[in-house]
Amino acid sequence: MRKFSLIFGIFIVAALSGTSALMAQEAAAAQADAGAFQTLKRYFIEGDWVWMSPVLIAFIFGLAFCIERIITLNIATVNTDKLISGIDEKLAQGDLEGAKEVTKATPGPTASILFEGLRNAANGPDAVEKSIVNYGSVQMGLLEKGLIWISLFIALAPMLGFLGTVVGMIQAFDRIEAAGDLSPSVVAGGIKVALLTTVFGLVVAIILQIFYNYIVSKIDGITNKMEDASIGLLEVMSRNNIFK
């Protein structure tokens, strides 16, 4: 019994020690995160708010456009195989209106272009294909909405940073000229502003570029699904003798 109590006591002490170590690690991680945020804040202030603020504004607006596009594109993504299967089921029953209702009940551009195709079914396969192509162009424009603004902020952020760099270097040379001495203490302030604005501008551009590439790849994926669904619709309509 005494031996069991001793083992149990050792187990409790080990568990408490492990918990304490885990809590200490979490506290250290939280402190490191807080320290990183404070460091970032300090560098932002030291970089001169006159030049850092435009970079921050470009980041906020660019990120807002990216988030809006990502949410919209995720909503627009649809299971095209399931959609075509539902249309095929209705057309096999001779229910063209029911097939239209299937597309109306499905969100996204793919369902919209398929609805346009079904709406022109009475005019023959050429009319269906033409309506799909024309309306597909409209939907592509809607999918790419806002990309031009993201591209603008990607280009603008590093340019604003470089502008701060040039101004900082000019300030550094002005101090050298005024002091008549090339000591580090004279030029350090201006050079620091120059480097910090450049770094922040490049970081903002890198982050927005990653989001931009993800959005473009998402649009390409939706476009491919739209093309596959369009081909599938024509096959389904032909198989069910919709074109008479």
Image (cartoon, rainbow, N blue to C red):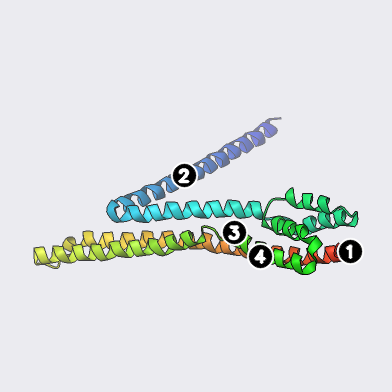
Query: Which of the two labelled residues, at mark 2 and mark 1, occupies the earlier sequence position?
Result: 2
Q: Are marks 1 and 3 in contact (CB under 8 Å)?
A: no
Q: Nearer the viewer, mark 3 or mark 2?
A: 3
Residue located beneath label 2 in the image: 30
Query: Helix, strand or loop at disc 1?
Result: loop
Q: Amino acid at mark 3?
A: Leu
What is the spatial separation of the Cα atoms under label 4 and label 3, in whole angstroms?
15 Å
Splitting the image into 4 quarters, where does residue 22 fall? top right
Q: Check disc 2: other Cα within 10 Å, few if <14, some if 14-19, many if 20+.
A: few
Q: Are marks 4 and 3 in contact (CB under 8 Å)?
A: no
Q: Residue furthest front?
A: 123
Query: Helix, strand or loop at disc 2?
Result: helix
Q: Residue at x 78, y 55 (%)?
A: 83
Q: Amino acid at mark 1?
A: Asn
How many marks can you see? 4
Q: Quadrant of the N terminus?
A: top right
Q: Nearer the viewer, mark 2 or mark 1?
A: 1
Query: Which of the two labelled residues, at mark 4 and mark 2, occupies the earlier sequence position?
Result: 2
